[in-house]
Amino acid sequence: MANYRLTLCYDGTRWKGWQKQGNTDNTIQGKLETLLSRLLDQPVEVNGSGRTDAGTHAKGQVASFRAKTHLTTDEILAGLRQYLPADIGAIDLEEAEPRFHARLSCTGKTYVYRIWRSEMPNVFERNYLYFCPGDLNVDAMRQAAEALADGDTNALFDIMARRDMAYEKALRAKILAETPKPPASDPNSEEAKRKDKENLRRLFGLPSNSK
């Protein structure tokens, strides 16, 4: 049984991410496995070098699969190009060494995040940008990026923890300032504490019945 290395590109706008799911067929991995199983007339399991979330795109996603077939790599690649939808592209297919595994053999990944800071609409690239007009704290973004590049994730998480603590304190201050106090209410009562938690959940966007 041969082992194959497949390189893909895809526009993830309408897909529910890379990983196949039990409640939908609308995933990249699921689409590939269905098509390859039909092309090669056997069950095929596809492994990706990494998982992308819903709406996320890839320029060079690597996948691997095993199959026993008389078809050449050129014929399999031609079949993929013919039957894959227009937003999934098969770039290259080659036979790999027996121990190659797209995820376990991966040596690196590159993530690109594009932020559109202008008020001017960007219709043609809207699915590939994060629209965020206005000022950004670029120094803080650089600090976080440098921590990641240096492998100092502890420092990054410390930065995030300090930010979250400051944000929560600001939210609590806002609640105390804007929430009217009920008459003859004990602030230490269970009812008062419960209302405070409900207000926090609303501001954080959490379900109101979460604990």
Image: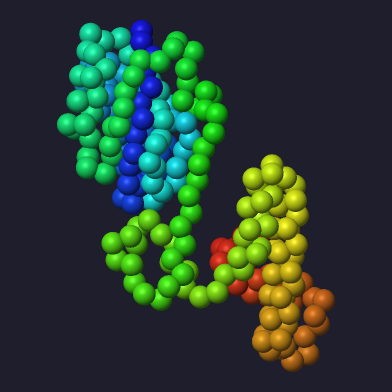
Q: What residue is drawn where x is 41% and y is 35%? A: 61
Q: Is residue 78 left or right of residue 9?
A: left
Query: Is 36 or 74 nearer to us in this picture?
Result: 74
Residue 202 visible: no
Which quadrant would residue 4 be assigned to in this image?
A: top left
Percent from the top left, x then y, of residue 112? 48, 49
Q: What residue is drawn where x is 75% and y is 51%? A: 155
Q: What residue is drawn where x is 26% and y is 44%? A: 87
Determine whether 137 is above or below 71 in the image.
below
**Quadrant in which the C terminus appears:** bottom right
**Quadrant in which the N terminus appears:** top left
Q: What residue is drawn where x is 73% and y is 79%? A: 173
Determine whether 203 is above or below 7 in the image.
below
Determine whether 6 is above or below 130 in the image.
above
Percent from the top left, x then y, of residue 102? 46, 25
Percent from the top left, x then y, of residue 56? 41, 48
